[in-house]
Image (spheres, rainbow, N blue to C red):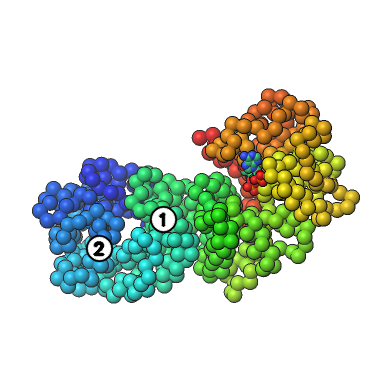
Amino acid sequence: MTLLCVPIMVEDVHAALADAEQARLAGADIVEFRIDALFQGEGDTEGEAGALRLCAESPLPCIITCRDASEGGEYSGDDAAKIALYERLGTSDKPPAYLDLELALWKRSANLRQKVLLAVTHSGQVREDVTTRLIISAHDFNGRPNDLLRIVADLREVEAAAVHKIAYRARSLRDNLELFDLLSERDRPTIALCMGEFGLMSRVLAPKFGGFLTFASLRDESATAPGQPTIHDLLHLYRFRAIGKDTKVYGVIGWPVSHSMSPLVHNAGFEAIGWDGVYLPLPVVADSNDPAASDSSFRASFLALVENERVHFHGASVTIPFKESLARLAFEIGMVPNDPAYIVNATGAANTFRDDLHKHVRPPDLDDGVVINSDVEGIESPLLERLDHFTGKQIFILGAGGAARAAAWACASRGSTVLVRNRTSSTAHRLVEDLTPLLAKDGGRVSVADDADVERLKPDAVINCTPIGMAGGPAEGDSPIDVSTLPDDCVVFDTVYNPLETPLLKSARARGLRTIDGVEMFVTQAAAQFELWTSQPAPVELFERIVRERLAD
Ligand code: NAP
């Protein structure tokens, strides 16, 4: 079982013990007392007494760590004083479960090594009452160390170490994969974690690869390393205790993804149906000034995940700005049919991937995956509920980006007459040129509208596919259209979901018009993803409740 450890930066012993009790109540197995701010080095009897008290009164087994400034800690005293303290702790009546020592310090001095050996249990230890075990650790806060394999070899040479620890800052998702390999090839209990926002997957997936422990902070602001999740998120959002070696991995790939609501809904959905899966935010850096570079980084990360033999990557949501990248890649490698009217080809975007290989079979064959654009379903289903059918309906779409393409295809491919109005008219014309040849001759149509068309046409539905009205967006507080001229039975659909009631929806409701909000779209498209991955009905009401509660916060 992988332990869940809450690290506590100790400045005040009483407060640290209270935090340890909170950690126990929250579900931690062990705490790490980081005493590097408490203990100042030689002659600090108060710091020493504090450390002894932490070990004696901790409500959970504890690791004592006096992290050196050279490895991201605050201790700048000398090595001998630190080792003397470790010796005192390890041979005390109430010793810590573990002492953590840097590999670099271990290598520096044979004399200090001898002293460390007095404080911990190992094959040459003569004292039977010494029970503390040694964690030998190496950290790199800048990135994957160039000499990673050398470091691993050096760790393995420390016979007395009960546990190895290696932690470095991930520069991309791919850095996690190498750590999973190290864990899988471990020769003793090993902690292998990536720091930073790209490293979350290594922390959450530690149980899948048999990691000795993972760290989680007690509160958002109490993390001792960048990218550390809170214990609440680890246990309740990512269902850490339910993760095992066969757990399927899913996630949302995008930039940024840290505020995505998809992990909330999909993890809750997996729990509701008893699905052995975990869903993670999977950030891939994008540069809006360099789409080609963004496309390359998406491909590199996506393929590394899909091709990895150990991760069991079963599916992904793909969001801004990579939906077009996934569609292109999927088409190139044969994951979508060679049919221009297939949903992904027609809309030029894909937001969902399912790996049909289930990755226990090697070698991987990428055309055994499926991609869809569930945004189309997210627009089509709620509209169909209100309009009954699409044939012969007039639909007015505001915007000509990805959501507008999904909306135009959803309606026109089922027989509606679609008018598109966009700030940049050339983009609207391109949308029309792309979709028109794909539509059945006797079916729907799509064309570019001007402002006068709204009044003239009396649409059955208006769909806002621009960010106008979105909290924090370019036109927060604005409505993209005046609803006063719309027919009484017109349906007003705003794809924007934050705020829950946009200015457009507010004015439409005030006029008594039927409305569809962005949450309904989000939940419907998420349900389509969930059903693609699990082949089971999605718990839609649960999804909806989670999203509305989160947005109402
Ligand atoms: P996109 O591809 O970037 O397209 C944005 C569209 O909005 C473009 O047509 C753009 O016009 C237009 N636009 C941007 N700022 C504008 C402004 N200040 N005034 C007028 N028009 C403006 O984005 P997208 O992926 O289509 O997303 C559009 C909206 O749909 C987002 O706000 C998002 O909230 C919503 N959405 C919701 C869901 C959901 O599940 N509920 C899913 C996807 C998207 P130009 O061509 O002139 O730049």
Q: Which element is circle 1 on?
A: loop
Q: For mark 2, does the 10 Å Cα neighbourhood hold few (<14), some (14 to 19), or many (20 or more) residues?
A: many
* Position in image of residue 200 (x %, y %): 45, 56
Rendered image: mark on residue 128: none
**Which residue is drawn at the image coordinates 47% and 61% (left, top)?**
172
Disc 2: residue Cβ within 8 A of ligand 1's nearest atom: no
State whether residue 217 is above or below residue 72: above
**Which residue is drawn at the image coordinates 60% and 43% (left, top)?**
543
Residue type for callout 2? Leu
Query: Circle 2 is placed at which residue position?
Result: 101
Query: Circle 1 is placed at which residue position?
Result: 196
Q: Which of 343/471 is in front?
A: 471
- Is residue 273 toward the left or the right of residue 343 in the image? left
Q: Quadrant of residue 305?
A: bottom right
Residue type for callout 1? Gly
Q: For mark 1, does the 10 Å Cα neighbourhood hold few (<14), some (14 to 19), or many (20 or more) residues?
A: some
* Position in image of residue 226 (x %, y %): 38, 53
Q: Which of 425/504 is in front?
A: 425
